[in-house]
Amino acid sequence: MKALLILARRVSLALVCLLLGPLLTAMLGLANPGGDWRDASHSKTGLAPDPRSHREALVQVYIARAFSWRGLFGSHSWIAVKRRGAPRYIVYEVLGWHARRGGDAVSTSTRWPDREWFGSRPRVLTTLRGPLAERAIPRIRAAVARYPYRHRYRLWPGPNSNTFVAYVGRAVPDLDLDLPPTAIGKDYLPLERWRTTTPSGHGWQLSLAGLAGLLVSPAEGWEVNLLGLGFGIDPGERALRLPAIGKLPLPGLRARRPLARSSGVPAPLVAE
């Protein structure tokens, strides 16, 4: 009987931990679980420089909360590139409805990259400018062409849009990509390839099909993956890594934030 009570307490504690993140996400207004996708906003947010006046090469990686109830747990990410002098951006992302219709899940479009994702305001995870971006763009294109799950999509635990962005990040370490725990699917790996570099390209991770794993990196910190949910700490940014919430700065500790590449602007540190 005592063993059953201990087990019940542990299960209850685990459920509280799993539900606390989505509840806090809703309370903080980080996600909007309601609404009709047909009426959702896709307004520009001003995060992407106008290519007509911004002539230098540019690479940006975006992330925004997923639509409807999915936004309480996770996010959607995508990559935008612009060659020097190009009049428009090219956006690479994985769209689940393409794969479900039997098509190619990888979408290549010229949509404006900083638009809201069905009402969720995006933020920029990383930016490359100038010669660094110019060198990275061919490598990004090559990684997009090699993506191995073009006709497969699974919301959880992957492969999905975050699996795609993580794959490109591993192939292009110059992106120094740090996907937050809300990027569910970033840790997905096939069972036969359970060990690889982290999405930043600067550390190592173990993953069993995205359902369990461990990540250690100077860029991302330390993170444990349980059922696709990430728990960890980022010593460099003095932040906790929490499922559904993302990165949560530790009070009273000053983050050692890296500079956004080639821009001289401090990278943002927010709960996401």
Image (cartoon, grey):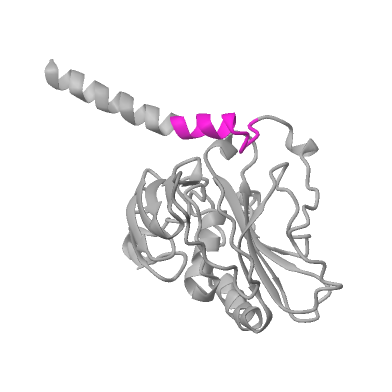
Q: Position of residue 142 (x, y in %)?
A: 58, 77
Q: Position of residue 269 (x, y in %)?
A: 55, 53
Residue extent of the magenta highlight: 20-33
Identified at 49% across, 74% down, the residue is: 173
Mark yes or no: residue 207 visible. Answer: no
Circle count: 0
Quarter of the image where the N terminus is located: top left
Identified at 73% across, 41% down, the residue is: 119
User: In this view, which residue lies farthest toward the right?
Assistant: 52
Q: Position of residue 130 (x, y in %)?
A: 68, 80
Identified at 81% across, 70% down, the residue is: 88
Q: In the rendered view, would you say 56 is above or below 127?
A: below
Quadrant of residue 2 in the image? top left
Mark yes or no: residue 195 visible. Answer: yes
User: In this view, which residue lies farthest toward the front?
Assistant: 252
Identified at 50% across, 41% down, the residue is: 245
Q: Let me know if residue 30 is in the magenta part.
A: yes
